Amino acid sequence: MTLRHAVLGLLADSPGSGYDLLKRFQTAMANVWSATQSQLYGELGKLEKAELIKVSAEGPRGRKEYSITDTGRTELQTWLLDPGPSPVPRSETLLRVYFLGEVSPAQARDYVARHGESAARLAEHLESLEASIDWDDADSSRYGRLVLEWGKRYAAMEQEWATWATERIRTTRG
């Protein structure tokens, strides 16, 4: 259901075509939620059929601009304020770490260190992203900054954890 709500949220901010929304996903939402072109256009069709969005303008070559309906805005607000069930934790990285005893300690340390390097690259990317955005007083800037800060702190935590974990992996078996 989250793609549905991401699209509704983007349209609540401002109307747009499928192409416009795809570009917003690739820029503003890239570090939060991704969507392929086929997923996005499929979701637009479902949302229109459910009367959560409507075609607000049509342009050349079949271009359709969508806007959120009152029903769609209510759906979005309900989703935003409902805590929902606690998510089931799933992490492929931590699953791999759990089974690192199956490889040599050197390989295990290398895996964890690479994870830390990946987190460092993410932190650098988020820093450059933050510097490249023309922040203003709009809700998308205000709350976008909160999301970006979460990403920066999460990347820093992963880097710190990887350093700690790498130091604790034994150098010999037994």
Image (spheres, helix red, strand yellow):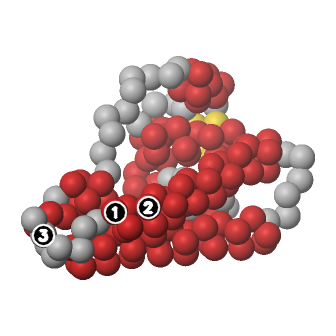
Mark 3 highlights which residue?
173
| Towards the viewer: 150 or 111 | 111
Disc with the residue nearer the chain's start (3 vs 1): 1
The crowd level at tag 1 (other Cα within 10 Å; few <14, some 14-19, many 20+) is few
Please state if 142 lies on the left or on the right of 106 as rendered: right
Q: CA distance from mark 3 to mark 1?
A: 13 Å
Could you tell me the amino acid type at mark 1? Arg
Q: Are marks 3 and 2 in contact (CB under 8 Å)?
A: no
Residue 123 seen in render: yes
* Quadrant containing the C terminus in the rendered view: bottom left
Residue pictured at 24% horizontal, 74% vertical: 171
Query: Of 143 and 22, which appears nearest the observer?
Result: 143
Q: Residues within 10 Å of mark 2 (few under 14, many from 20)?
A: some
- Quadrant showing the N terminus: top left
Name the quadrant containing residue 126: bottom right
Marks 2 and 1, how far apart at CA:
7 Å
Determine whether the residue tagged by mark 2 lies in a helix, strand or loop.
helix
Count of numbered circles on the image: 3
* Residue name at image x 53 percent, y 20 percent: 82
Question: In the rendering, which numbered label is found on residue 168?
Answer: 1
Residue at left 79%, top 65%?
A: 133
Mark 3 residue type: Arg
Left or right of residue 163: residue 52: right
Q: Which mark is residue 164?
A: 2
Instruction: Give the CA distance from mark 3 to mark 2.
Output: 19 Å
Asked if marks 2 and 1 touch (Cβ < 8 Å), the reply is yes
Position of residue 40 relative to residue 23, above or below, is above
